[in-house]
Amino acid sequence: MKVASEVPRLDVQRLRADFPILDRKVHGKRLVYLDSAATTQKPEAVIEALSHYYRTFNANIHRGIHSLAEEATEAYEQTRRKVASFIGGVEPRSIIFTRNATEGLNLVAYAWGRHHVGSGDEILLTEMEHHSNLVPWMLLAREKGAVLKHIPITDEGELRLDCLSDLMTARTKVVSVTLVSNVLGTINPVREIADAAHRYGALMVVDGAQGVPHLPVDVRALDCDFLAFSGHKMLGPTGVGVLYGRPELLMNMEPFLGGGEMIREVRLDRATWNDIPWKFEAGTPNIADVVAFSAALDYLEAVGMDAVRAHEVELTGYGLERLLSLGWIKIYGPRDPDRRGGVLAFNDPEIHAHDLSTILDQYGIAIRAGHHCAQPLMRRLGAAATSRASFYLYNDRDDIDALVEALIAAGKYFGRNTRVHPAG
Ligand code: C6P
């Protein structure tokens, strides 16, 4: 990662022009899109790539030998090579296309877990996981009689690594941790946890859904065995996910789904499997969206992930300062913007998160409200729901100012006598 002074500042106004949706109005107001942790908006290049695919070379891949099929196959495989390069220059055969991060995590729990986790074995997760990194492991633990354990968090929303040595045992088979929390924003010390996992002979799985889109990620630096993420959270179309897996592991795993494409030879009573990664891509994949995802990767590469990260640190710092200056907003997660990604979950003690989100929508502001698919974390935080503003490369300080103004207006609507306090 480059030092901050070497990283070029984003020209947000220029970038915004690439996102047609940002021109639209909501309830007559400028759209202020602060829900990129749920899904990001798409640049013209991605929309155009999708349309270009259907207009010019739509065909099924890996099957036909006509020109369209060859062009479609090449474009699909080219995206795989770009993804491999994007996460640190790994082998393209270690990249499996899934529907989303959720499917990637389920693939690991099912195809690896069912053959390597047994009764009494332990699966170590954390208290801040998204349901996608909890429920697949619950299903596995229930089937195998395995034990689920969780690294607790501090009141500031950081993992209690001091508990790690007590939680890891010779029975720990897998550790699965999110790189960035979708609620707290916390960036977790994955490398440190991976080192501990490997000392105990356990696998390290990383949920990269909120990490890969926002930080420069190098799989080798993380030293993880699996990494799952979603294309739609990084400017790509919905319906494309990525699972990186260490090739030695993937080669020795049983398939996840059976069908066309994932086989080498099929008899009536038995079959052998294709090479990786195709062994894990049964049936016709989401060709069009994978092809268009390539344009999203090009876009992010051109902007530079160091610049994306630096921009989000700056914006998150400004957001924290402005929200705290109101004096009544409770913010979850670390206070230091360098220790967190671009999500700010917060609560107004007098207005329910859902009401707040409905009012903000009247001002054209899109935020998310609810449990953010992290109910155990919500319980730990003592909150039934939170509001959440999340940023990406097309957001700027004006968006945060609009949010703050609307929060003040919402307070007035609910009868609050507003006085803005200094930041603290
Ligand atoms: N979080 C959010 O608004 P999918 O749905 O498979 O693309 O991503 C699942 C997922 C996994 N891990 C983390 C940390 C996530 O944040 C998400 C998706 C969205 O926070 C939708 S619930």
Image: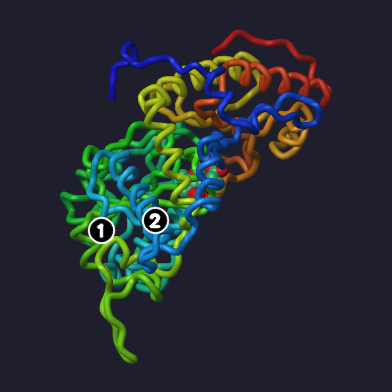
- State the quadrant of the N terminus: top left
- CA separation, marks 1 and 2? 28 Å
Image x and y of residue 253, in percent: 26, 68
Residue farthest bottom in this picture: 268
The quarter of the picture where residue 259 lies is bottom left
Q: Nearer the viewer, residue 276 or 359?
A: 276
- State the quadrant of the C terminus: top right
Mark nearer the N terminus (1 vs 2): 2
- The correct choice, above or below, for 392 with respect to 276 in the image is above
- The correct choice, above or below, for 117 with respect to 3 in the image is below
Mark 2 residue crowding within 10 angstroms, few (<14) / some (14–19) / many (20+): many
Residue type of the residue flagged with mark 2 = Phe
Image x and y of residue 276, in percent: 26, 63
Q: Which residue is mark 1?
A: 172
Mark 2 CB near ligand 1 (8 Å cut): no
Q: Which residue is mark 2?
A: 97
